Amino acid sequence: MATPAAAPTLLATEASRAENFVVLDVSPAAWIALLVLIVALLAIDLYRHREAHVPSTREALLESGAWVACGLGFSVVILAFFGSGAFGEYLSGYLTEKALSVDNVFVWSILFSSLAIPVALQHRVLFWGIFGALALRAVFIFAGAALITEFEFLLIVFGLFLVYTGIRMIQHRDDEGEGSSMAGLRLLERVMPVSKELDGQKFFTRINGRRAATPLLAALVVVEATDLIFAVDSVPAILALSNEEFLIFSSNAFAILGLRAMYFLLADARQRFHYLNHALGAILVFVGLKMAASRWYHLNVWYSLGIIAALLVGAVIFSERKNRQLAATGAGRSAGDR
């Protein structure tokens, strides 16, 4: 219980934070509508991929575009019902989570390769992995928001953690994630036997009459474990951009829903994005500093959105420039060899 002297200070800091972000009166009906929409989209996606197959580049591109359209379309709903401030915070959260998810996609590519999961079966793993990720993010978001409301000094702690994580991401290793697959297998083997062979799309099979996990379940465990690690970074980053659980969760949800299509579109394009990790690290450093300093200074949400977008666009432009330089260098060497 706060002392009489501390109570005015606590109320003042809570009021200051509330003034920096939009404050919404979200009804239970809005939450129910959001959850129904998410479940419906997941059901449609599961039905479309009920048969295992290898998605073509065109299919992955169309699906990725459709998911982005859903995310941006929901931003229009936010604008219509809650105003431009909420719209800006939602877009900032959506864009940040979408950007940070790209690194998650590349790690999944390494994990699936190390576990020898066929491309045709990877969608099933990712579907249930992302379904679990939504539940996990909800817990993280509500717990994080409650902690920040109760203990404002955690803004500084989370902010400095994001700065540290951002610096590490800038120093990102290409082999990151290789050890996670073996760790996931060892974790699962402690609980139950793990088959060395796949059994179609099944997560469980039988070995000598005993129930055992297939490599598909091992891959799912690893995907969930890696998402837990990424959530530790991304959820505090979103909390630095909004104070409303509805905006934070919905922006996270729509960004995560499109990860499967993004995976099949970008999994093999890691080498093309030379400066992506630099941009993602810079974004984490930026939102970390913003979060740590929010007690004394608040940066307008539209400036934040512009900085995040500029970092991502810059990473793509400079990556493409480097690709052209490497291609020209390679062509020059080939001509010299002749």
Image: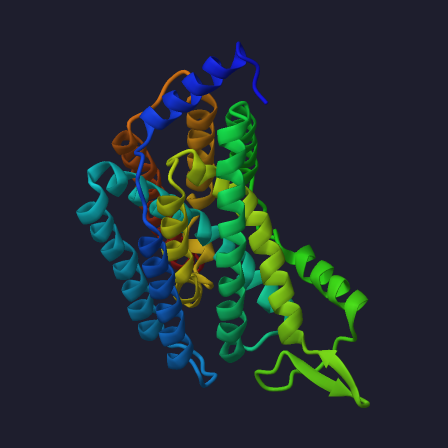
Q: Position of residue 217 (x, y in %)?
A: 64, 72
Quarter of the picture holding the C terminus: bottom left
For the point 73% across and 58% down, the residue is 183
Q: Is residue 271 above or below residue 111?
A: above
Left or right: where does residue 318 sit relative to residue 84? Answer: right
Left or right: where does residue 24 sit relative to residue 263? Answer: left
The answer to whether one can see residue 338 in this image is: no
Q: Is residue 36 above or below residue 118?
A: above
Q: Quadrant of residue 253?
A: bottom left
For the point 75% across and 75% down, the residue is 194
How many marks can you see? Answer: 0
Can you name the residue that lies furthest to the top here? 5
Quarter of the picture holding the N terminus: top right
Can you name the residue that lies furthest to the left here? 80
For the point 36% across and 54% down, the residue is 31
For the point 78% across and 68% down, the residue is 191
The answer to whether one can see residue 194 in this image is: yes
Residues 281 and 260: in front is 260
Q: Is residue 185 above or below residue 252?
A: below
Residues 111 and 93: in front is 93
Q: Position of residue 333 (x, y in %)?
A: 42, 54
Q: Is residue 58 above or below residue 337?
A: below
Q: Quadrant of residue 283?
A: top left
Residues 247 and 171: in front is 247
Q: Quadrant of residue 29?
A: bottom left
Q: How is the image coloured?
A: rainbow
Q: Position of residue 85 (x, y in %)?
A: 24, 36
Residues 317 and 195: in front is 195
Q: Position of residue 57 (x, y in %)?
A: 35, 72
